[in-house]
Image (cartoon, grey):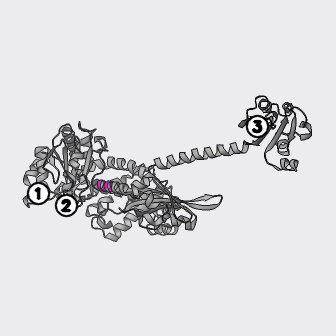
Amino acid sequence: MLNFILNSTHDAIVAVDSAGDVLVFNRAAEKLIGKRAADVLGRPVKEGIPNTGLDDVLRTGIPEINKTQDLHNRTVVVTNRVPVRDSQGKIVGAVAVFRDITEIRTLAEEITNLKQIQSLLTAVINSTQDAISVVDHRGMGLLINPAYTRLIGLSEEDVIGRPATVDIAEGESVHLQVLRTRKPVKNTRMKVGPMKRPVVVNGSPIMVDGKLMGSVAVIRDVSEIMQLTEELERIRSMVQGFEAKYTFDDVVAESPLMVQAVEQAKLVASTPVTVLLRGESGTGKELFAHAIHNASPRRHKPFVRVNCAALPRTLLESELFGYVDGAFTGARKGGRKGLFEEANGGTLFLDEIGVMDLSIQASFLRVLQEREITRIGDSKPIPIDVRVIAATNVALEQMVAAGKFREDLYYRLNVIPIFIPPLRQRPEDIPKLCRFLLRKLNQEYGRAVKGVDDDVMYRFAAYKWPGNVRELENVLGRAIINMGFQEQIIFTEHVPPLGWGGQLSPALSWDASIPGADAGVTLRAAVAKAEAEAIKRALERHGYNKTRAAKSLGISIRALYNKIRKYGLDHQTS
């Protein structure tokens, strides 16, 4: 019965007599030490277990409790060794009970690692600036981080153990969507917390061994982004950048009038004097403003462009001069600097100055005179150093006479007026303008157009160009679109009709565009003659290859044959 009990226990038991010979060696000891009991029993314990401590217990009589011991097979055990005494207290033997702790030690190390990982993850979650929320598979709150509390305004007591919807002011719970679909949910917009803060939420399921254990959500505050976006759009609508892009090298000036305007602009560029650019729409007033700024000592300071016509009159004053906190309903908290302050040290370009309201003209005049501005709602003047360049396409003298523009402001602005001539007064510039604009359009359209046919250039020179350079650029752009991808020269058939509504301008009459035409010829005859000339040039350009000529003209090969016979061009194509 005793042997049965000893061999049934999970702990290894080794007992020795007073001489140190093994008396007991159970089955657990056989497995742990790797030796059979028959080879150990009756023999000195040192032979079976070389590093045993039982001989020390026999000698000293002192028990050894919870001692670790390495066996020959590198198994780590914990052992208890106690002396065995008779009724007189004499040591008659010793017993060791030991257990393999290799698995226990590994498990303890894993637990320690898990605790370290948990601490690390907790530190990461708590240090991130994004709000994080975790719920279990039932949708009940498990975890939130400090960023969540700062953003949402709810504490752990408000969230942990509560339903996932507890923090939602507007919108559907991302957690519940994730738990329902078992799929991630991205970029869901909603409002959360008592303050109904606008956020964007991304949620993902928590899967463990294929089982849904919960949901984690990352919540980002977008209120500041929305405010910045609105501010950016507002600035973009008024100001086209704080940097001048063009120089006088970008100004095409071959005609005497344009050369005179450029020379005058170069002279005033180095001075701080106010400049008034005058000219029709599309003549290049903004180009001159950029060039003057870049040729001035202020070239490294801001260049602020404001289109006075693009802003409502009620907003123009606040945008130019700024305002303080609480100046009016809807004013931004903390106030805002005006565009005069944004341009401090640099240049402020006021386009379409003629539409400025009379009430704002008075404040604007004071800025030009005193070189200081006062924000709306404030009484403290702010000194500024801004060079003003104004532009207009209207006759300010007539507006002054009609009482729509202040006379004193007119004289303050008209210190150095620079008149930019319309394109019809500078036909000498058209060839160079075409080359300049084609380089720009080639980059935009990904083309390689080299130039304009002489006949097209002749027509351009005869046209009045009411839209000026801007209209020329549009015509060239449309011509490029009408060209084949491999074509490199703009011919008559590529150019759209010139003039308002696609109708020919009176300035581009057919007797002017087709040499030798009879001024009294009927419209039908003029059109026929022009069509015949276009077909003839297309055939010559393509070596009388009718297929390529028809393709360049945008007509079928059959229609081309019919027109060749109609206009008697057969003898030229044979």
Instruction: Give the residues in magenta.
Output: 231-242
Residue tagged 2: 314
* Residue 211: quadrant of the picture: bottom right
Q: Which of marks 1 and 2 is in front?
A: 2
Residue tagged 3: 82
Apparent side of residue 272 relative to residue 554 in the rendered image (left or right): left
Residue 290 colored magenta?
A: no
Residue tagged 1: 405
Residue type at mark 2: give it. Answer: Thr
Please rate how many residues cluster around mark 1, counting C-alpha atoms within 10 Å: few if below 14, some from 14 to 19, many from 20.
many
Q: Mark 1: which secondary structure?
A: loop
Please rate how many residues cluster around mark 3, counting C-alpha atoms within 10 Å: few if below 14, some from 14 to 19, many from 20.
many
Apparent side of residue 87 relative to residue 505 in the rendered image (left or right): right
Asked if 332 appears above or below 93 in the picture, the reply is below
Q: Which of 201 and 446 is in front in this view?
A: 201
Q: Nearer the viewer, mark 2 or mark 3?
A: 3
Residue at horizontal 30 percent and vertical 51 percent from the top: 240
Apparent side of residue 523 relative to residue 61 in the rendered image (left or right): left
